[in-house]
Amino acid sequence: MLIEKSIRGHSMVSTGLFTLGIFAFAWLVPGQPLWLSLLPLSLPLWMMYRTVHQQGHAGLIWHIPQSTILPLLLATGAGLVLGTGVGSGYRLSLGMSGIPMGLTLFAITAVCIGAAEEFIFRGALFYLLRPQPAWLTIPLTAAAHAGYKTLLFASPYAEQALISPNLFWYTFLAGLILGGLRLAGGSLWPPLLAHVAWDLIVYGDSPAAPWWVW
């Protein structure tokens, strides 16, 4: 019991420091030199290194060994349907076509950004929180993702600083769904592909990157 509590305590401390580094990056990256923005990322990288070095099982970032192929396929299919459907609905709400009329160079960047976010929040952060129960892990990773996105837009260094509670709650809700896909499929692939599908639909024909990307 004491060992289990110690592991869970270490998990929460590592998660807090990991998230702090990600938040600092989001705050700085819109307008500071790249080298300065990247410095806070040394904190999450160090937390990951320590955890992998002490506890091993780095493969759990991608996949839970006990899971079987059927839940993975079902969760992946659900993720692709959700990502595509919600992305199309978002485009229609803006008066755009339901699907992109082509693919631009930025679409590749958008997909890479979405995949990177999933690796960070549903991959690495899920890994750090794995000693915790799912009812805690999923909302914590969703809150971290929502906080990161909100800070990215609200940063005083942003070209068009935006403080929107709706942005936090929409991202938090999306994070809960993506975390559920991660748990149901036992793998990072369902939420990652769902996020990629969303970005591909929403930004597929964007002629240029939105201001917040760079």
Image: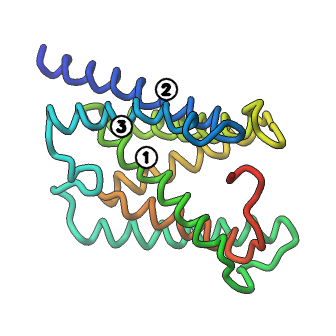
The x, y position of residue 121, in whole percent, is 44, 45
Percent position of residue 88, x then y:
70, 72
At x 73%, y 63%, the residue is 209
Q: Which secondary structure lies at badge 3?
A: helix
Work out whether residue 149 or residue 136 is closer to the camera in this orientation and state it.
149
Single out the residue that lies furthest toward the bottom. 101
The residue singled out by tag 2 in the image is 20
Q: Distance between the Cα atoms at labels 1 and 3?
A: 11 Å
Indicate which disc residue 92 carries. Answer: none
Amino acid at the residue labelled 1:
Ile
Residue bearing the label numbered 3: 45
Q: How is the image coloured?
A: rainbow
Amino acid bearing label 2: Leu
The answer to which image quadrant residue 9 occupies is top left
Query: Which amino acid is tagged 3?
Result: Leu
- Label 2: which secondary element: helix
Circle 2 residues within 10 Å: few <14, some 14–19, many ≥20 = some
Inter-mark Cα distance, 1 to 2? 13 Å
Relative vertical location of residue 142 with respect to residue 206 in this rendering, above or below: above
- Give the mark, 1 or 2, whose residue is nearer the N terminus: 2
Q: Which residue is drawn at 62% across and 45% down?
A: 171
| CA–CA distance in space, label 2 to label 3 | 12 Å
| Residue on which disc 1 sits | 120
- Of 36 and 202, the residue lying toward us: 36
Quarter of the figure with residue 48: top left
Could you tell me if the residues under marks 1 and 2 are in contact, i.e. CB atoms within 8 Å?
no
